[in-house]
Amino acid sequence: MLKSLEVKDYALIEHINVQFGQGLNIITGETGAGKSILIDAMSLLLGERASTEVIRKGAVKSVVEGIFEASANKKVEALLSENDVEFFPELIVRREISLKGANRCFINDTPVPLNLVKEIGNFLVDLHGQHEHQSLLRTEMHIEFLDEFGAVANLLDEYKTYYTELNKKLNELKELRAKELSLKEKKELYSFQIKEIDAVSPEEGEEQRLIEELNILENAEKLLESTTNIYQTLYDSETSVYDSLVKIKNEIETLLKIDKTFNETSAECTTALTLLNDIADFIRGYNSKIDLDPQNLEEMRQRLGVLNLLKKKYGGSITKIIEYRKKIGDEFEIASNYAGTINNIENEILQLKINCGKAAEKLSHKRKETAKIISREVKEVLADLGIPDALFEVKILNIPADKTGQHFIIVKDKNYTYGSSGFDDVEFFISTNIGEETKPLAKVASGGEVSRIMLSLKTILAKNDKLPLLIFDEIDTGVSGRVAQKVGHALKALASYHQIIAITHLPQIAGLADIHFMVEKSNVDDRVVSHIDKLTGEQRVHEVAKLMSGEIITEASLNGARELMNLK
């Protein structure tokens, strides 16, 4: 939900701050007062292109800032997380356009690129009017409308699993075929390198182990001499530490018989003797294993030399050598059995095309059932909205694949093109006049008709559509009287599911507002300034009456306004 919109130095607007609410927010005002400027400012906030021409004369920059309630919008939260922008329940989006040409965007005071603002905007607002930000006129969005209504998420997920795996295998096959000649040319080289590496068979961690062992062997004489001296000092001499400690222990045992306070010291002497035995045993064992064999020393030096040669040729470390051996081993295997490898992958691809086709067919069947419901219900709603002879079609096409290509899936033994959403091309077609054939909706020229068509779609999709805010600019174009009242009631019903902001000239619609704003322009210091005011009580009644009778407000028009507004 849009909580507030602040606009500074934008076109005729010097500074406004509008506090919107839930339900149906209506904006009225005379032609040229600046109502559409608000919508243009909103479009700017949603990521549309900007020009320095929008900057109010005398100002250095235009600023548009919107505060959205986004606590339940998981898509926005996920997108911000992906882009390292902190998420808050109140989402503040700001855009600045300066005379210097700088175009700065912020989300929660964090500078962000324009494309992120546009992505966020697509999850927050659907704007319908004389603007590019109309999802209904983007043909690629029609399939999303259809899928949202049909609740096909599970079928779509099943299809996308096969779709992802199929594309992965197709890329694998493409890469393999692209390097066929290269593999065959390198086969002999790989064969030589494999034999060279396998002849040495380096192992992970081997080099460090050899260096440590070599260091020991090269210092074997020193180790032998030192350990011999240590053992003799500790245990194997007339004045050994062990014999001296035994004498001391015996003396303490004598003292212990006289004074029990030597009890703990006696125990510590026993422990010291045990520890001394352990040290002596370790030194003796180590001494007995010392290798003075010069041949063993030379073999280790040669092994290290061979490993160093391999490192220079194949990556600089044992790990890199092992990784390279695996890589060329795999490629050598492929080159040796290229035809068989290709055949195996092609068989996997064929099965994936069949599986993908089955999933796409189930998805398409569900869409076609949904399309019939949408076509019927939209036609009924359009009749109520003043287009009684409308025909609405959801056309679903499946395009046969080029026989020479690989990019296809198999549905009932026939090849079809496909994409991330299946093998259906979905487009809305409409005819608004009796006797005319339906034509692509994207080519409908009337903005008012587009808005009413969107209103009809939104009416039947309301419970499924997740966009929190819908904006309708001039939805009343070409309607009046009874039809206008029905348009108003349709908007009112839609406002039960979404926040609605609508610009209108019709009292039948304005009278149903939950919150009513009026845009006016006035001369301030010989300059035209647009401002917007929230109307309450009798102000609302007078504005609706003015829409009914013009500048001269009569008692009859006031009574009519109260009746439209269901006021007594």
Image (cartoon, rainbow, N blue to C red):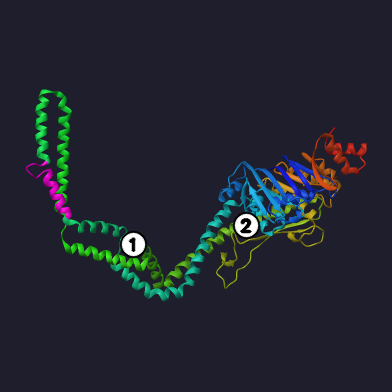
Evaluate whether residue 400 shows in this view.
yes
Q: Residue at x 51, y 60 (%)?
A: 165
The secondary structure type at the circle numbered 1 is: helix
Q: Position of residue 139 (x, y in %)?
A: 69, 59
Towards the viewer: 467 or 34 = 34
Q: Is residue 227 magenta?
A: yes
| Image quarter hosting the N terminus | top right
| Image quarter hosting the C terminus | top right
Is 387 located above or below residue 170 in the figure?
Answer: above
Q: Which residues are magenta?
A: 222-240
Residue 193 location, quadrant: bottom left
Main secondary structure of the magenta stretch:
helix
Towards the viewer: 162 or 293 = 293
Q: Which residue is mark 2?
A: 365
> Mark 2 or mark 1, which is nearer the start of the sequence?
1
Is 455 located above or below residue 265 in the figure?
Answer: below
Q: Residue at x 30, y 65 (%)?
A: 307
Q: Are marks 1 and 2 in contact (CB under 8 Å)?
A: no
Question: CA–CA distance between discs 1 and 2?
Answer: 57 Å
Could you tell whether 235 is left or right of 154 in the image? left
Q: Is residue 75 magenta?
A: no
Which disc, if any, is residue 318? 1
Q: Residues within 10 Å of mark 2 (few under 14, many from 20)?
A: few
